[in-house]
Image (cartoon, rainbow, N blue to C red):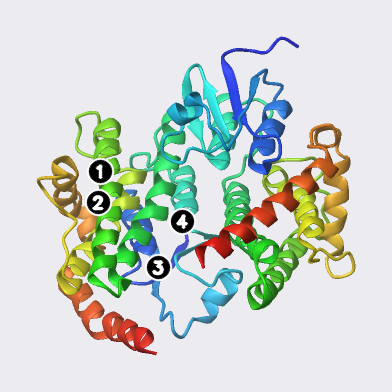
Amino acid sequence: MGEVELKLLGMWASPFAIRVRIVLNQKGLKYEYFEEDLKNKSELLHKYNPIHKKVPVLIDKDRSVCESLIILQYIDEISQTGPSVLPTDPYERAMTRFWAAYIDDKVFLAMGGILKATTEEEKTDKITEAMSVLELLEETFKKCSKGKYFFGGDTIGFLDVTLGSYLVLLKAAEKVFEFKILDETKFPKLMEWTERFLSTDCVKEVMPKVERVEEFYTKIVKPRWAAASSQ
Amino acid sequence: MVPNSEVRLFGMWASPAVWRVEWALKMKGIEFEYIEEDVSDKSSSLLMYNPINKQVPVLVHNGKPIVESLVILEYIDETWNDKPILPVDSYERAKARFWATFVDVKCREAARKSFFGEGEERENGIENLEIQLKALDEELEGKKFFAGNSIGYTDLVVGWMAFWLGVAEEAGDFKAVNSSKFPFFTAWIENFLQDPLIKNNLPPRDKTVEFFRLFRQAGSCAKANVK
């Protein structure tokens, strides 16, 4: 079998790009990584994702695959190495796809809601919303893991990387924007899982350091939003 | 045909997401029991099977519920795996899934703005829809259906734009689909609606237009109440 010629366009803080890199690592797939400056998008990005111009984009020889969850499924289907990212049973696959879409829909929104809240009352409301999402995910973790380490069982799977890719951003946001949702007493299983996930090699290699994200939030994101809301 | 009690579909007659599941079931020759839901007074079964989103469609297979139409389509294809609906090649599958999220997220949002919106919001919706239709038009150049000569997953998923977009245009009094700007897409609409599977499996058009008209009015009232 010939060399796999993969390229990945990504951005260091993007949970969508992070999750793809974790899975590529886990599968032992070699790829050339291109860091995108999203304020000055490259020709490659325009060429290989002309419709959305977003990262991540996986380029396999000369063909591109866009949208992180689609890329993850593609990698799972083409790779001969490493554990399966999706379960094999159709019903479990359906549950996994459902929860992945739920996570991307709710978690990102919940986090954004808290960060962009303009009053304390609004912030409290958004925090409550985020907590109810995590409550559901705590239950989902128990069901999916069946007593094992990850949503995917013995090894990191689709839901682990989907949710896990947000973790360092969440931790940094908690510090910079002064709130707490990652609560060990309310979500014990989920919090155990977060530490386990973050200490796994294929994740450590890719996940940005929390201090770097804190700096990003402090120096770039917070002032940008403060300027926008004062207009 | 005797309904198979092992497969049940909870739906609503006007919902495109429900119809795409019905089309898939019929393409595969799967017998199923259909249960019409009154979405203004949801049944306890629906709420039990879909407690998170409380929406149709819900497919219940041997007592186990699957929700979200795109998830259901993949489940159907993987469980009854003869006559595949999704392409077999991994890259083509990725493309099919890409178009699914494109029409269900981007096009749906643009259509919503065009239908419910007013003034600038509406104009913005129509403008976006035209950009999206161009992309779909380019994808369809030289092809009868998205994957070739017969209907497949992408056609089923984009299918709402063949019927319900026209209904929304009529009920919402706007126009985006244009045969001279989007000739391949317009030809695809014809081919899709004439296919025997689809032709005999659509809600009645007049009734659907009327439903959407009322739906639009309710949407305007809701907006007025919020202010």
Is B168 above or below relative to B157?
below
Q: Amino acid at mark 3?
A: Glu
Q: Nearer the viewer, mark 4 or mark 1?
A: 1
Do residues under tags 1 and 3 come within 8 Å of each other at their CB atoms?
no
- Can residue A64 be seen in this snapshot? no
Residue highlighted by disc 3: A32
Identity, as a three-letter code, of the amino acid under mark 1 = Glu
* Front-lying residue, A222 or A192: A222
Task: Name the residue tied to disc 4.
Answer: A4
- Are labels 1 and 3 on one chain? yes
The subunit letter for the residue under badge 3 reads A
**Quadrant location, the N terminus of chain B:** top right
To which quarter of the image does residue A29 belong?
bottom left
Label 2: which secondary element: helix
Residue B92 to residue B224: above or below: above
Subunit ID for the residue under disc 4: A
Tell me where residue A24 appears, x and y as whole percent: 36, 54
Residue kind at label 2, given as amino acid type: Met
Q: Earlier in the sequence, mark 2 or mark 4?
A: 4
Q: Position of residue A155 (x, y in %)?
A: 26, 39
Mark number for residue B163? none
Q: Secondary structure at mark 1?
A: helix
Q: Which mark is residue A135?
A: 1
